[in-house]
């Protein structure tokens, strides 16, 4: 049995700095909660952005609100995991992707509970498109999910030639989600900025912890019994 399971007890060097960043994000959120003057400045930014509403932008922002909301987000992660399983035939890769996306994303709710920053005063905006019933603001769950999803894909796509294209397109999506949350007035600019920083650190920590887990023999695709290492087999 021991020969069928590999594990690494060494914590990757990136884990500790990333964990420190998570702590700093929480500390920053707590400081912002108490900085009423700065919150007033950010609320002013939201009001100015709110005056720039157009029907096309409204539809775009509301579509993002739905697409990256919790119900659809869970489906996107599951779809990504199933797709990876079918393409790579490696259960561990699929589970790894889902784990390093879901764990940091769910951790966003923990950060919110620790920071306790109230949402912006949405009813005071001239154009109210989404009326969030209370709730907490720091960090943005939608933005955090978009960033975690992109980073999870980049982790499992390491070594692929199309990875830079994925990084570029994914960055545009993440920034679009972040801007849409400010546009809708449901998050302060610092909420969405902190979400991207948190997601980057959170995925790094989750991936580092994942690398320490035992690797069961069934979780990776194995070569055929008669295959010779290094041999290229003809079809």
Image: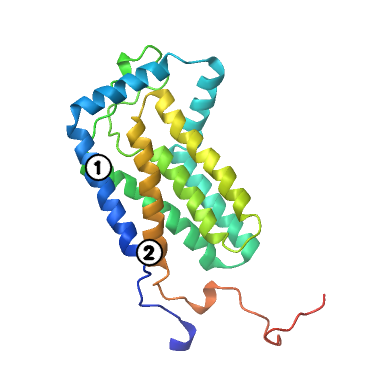
| Mark found first going from the N terminus, 2 or 1 | 2
Instruction: Find residue 41 and name its label.
Output: none
Asked where in the image residue 70 lies, by quadrant, the reply is: top left
Residue drawn at x 52%, y 79% is: 217
Instruction: Measuring from the top left, give residue 75's x and y in whole percent.
Output: 51, 45
Q: Quadrant of residue 137?
A: top left
What residue is disc 1 on?
A: 28
* Horizontal side, residue 53 vs residue 22: left or right: right
132 displayed left or right of 69 = left
Disc 2 target residue: 14
* Residue 162 drawn at (x, y percent): 65, 54
Q: Residue furthest top?
A: 126
Q: Position of residue 81 (x, y in %)?
A: 54, 56
Residue at 67% across, 86% down = 229
Label 2–label 1 contact, CB within 8 A: no
Query: Does 85 sit above or below residue 213?
Result: above
Q: Residue at x 37, y 11 (%)?
A: 126
User: Closer to the camera, 85 or 191?
Assistant: 191
Rendered location of residue 15, percent (x, y): 35, 63
Within 10 Å of disc 1 (Cα), the crowding (few <14, some 14-19, many 20+) is: some
- Gap in angstroms between the C-alphas marked 2 and 1: 21 Å
SS category of the residue bearing label 1: helix
Q: Is residue 103 left or right of residue 177?
A: left
Looking at the rendering, in which quadrant would you find the C terminus?
bottom right
Quadrant in the picture for the N terminus: bottom left
Report helix, strand or loop for mark 2. Answer: loop
Camera sees residue 43: yes
Judge whether 40 appears above or below 72 on screen: above
Residue extending farthest left: 34
Q: Is residue 205 above or below residue 179?
A: below
Residue 105 visible in rendering: no
Give the residue drawn at x 57%, y 56%.
82
């Amino acid at each position: 049995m021991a020969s069928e399971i590999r594990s690494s007890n060494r914590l990757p060097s990136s884990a500790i700095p990333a964990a420190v960043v998570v702590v700093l994000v929480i500390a920053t959120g707590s400081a912002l909660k108490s900085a009423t003057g700065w919150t007033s400045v950010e609320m002013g930014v939201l009001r100015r952005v709110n005056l720039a509403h157009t029907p096309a932008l409204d539809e775009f922002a509301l579509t993002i609100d739905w697409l990256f909301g919790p119900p659809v987000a869970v489906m996107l992660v599951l779809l990504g995991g199933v797709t990876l399983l079918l393409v790579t035939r490696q259960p561990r890769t699929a589970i790894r992707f889902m784990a390093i996306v879901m764990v940091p994303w769910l951790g966003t709710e923990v950060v919110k509970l620790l920071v306790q920053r109230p949402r912006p005063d949405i009813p005071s905006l001239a154009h109210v498109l989404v009326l969030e019933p209370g709730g907490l603001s720091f960090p943005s769950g939608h933005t955090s999910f978009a960033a975690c999803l992109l980073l999870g894909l980049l982790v499992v796509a390491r070594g692929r030639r199309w990875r830079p294209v994925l990084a570029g397109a994914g960055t545009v999506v993440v920034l679009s989600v972040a801007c849409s949350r400010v546009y809708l007035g449901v998050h302060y600019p610092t909420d969405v900025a902190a979400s991207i920083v948190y997601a980057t650190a959170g995925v790094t920590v989750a991936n580092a912890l994942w690398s320490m887990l035992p690797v069961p023999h069934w979780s990776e695709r194995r070569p055929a019994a008669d295959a010779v290492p290094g041999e290229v087999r003809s079809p």
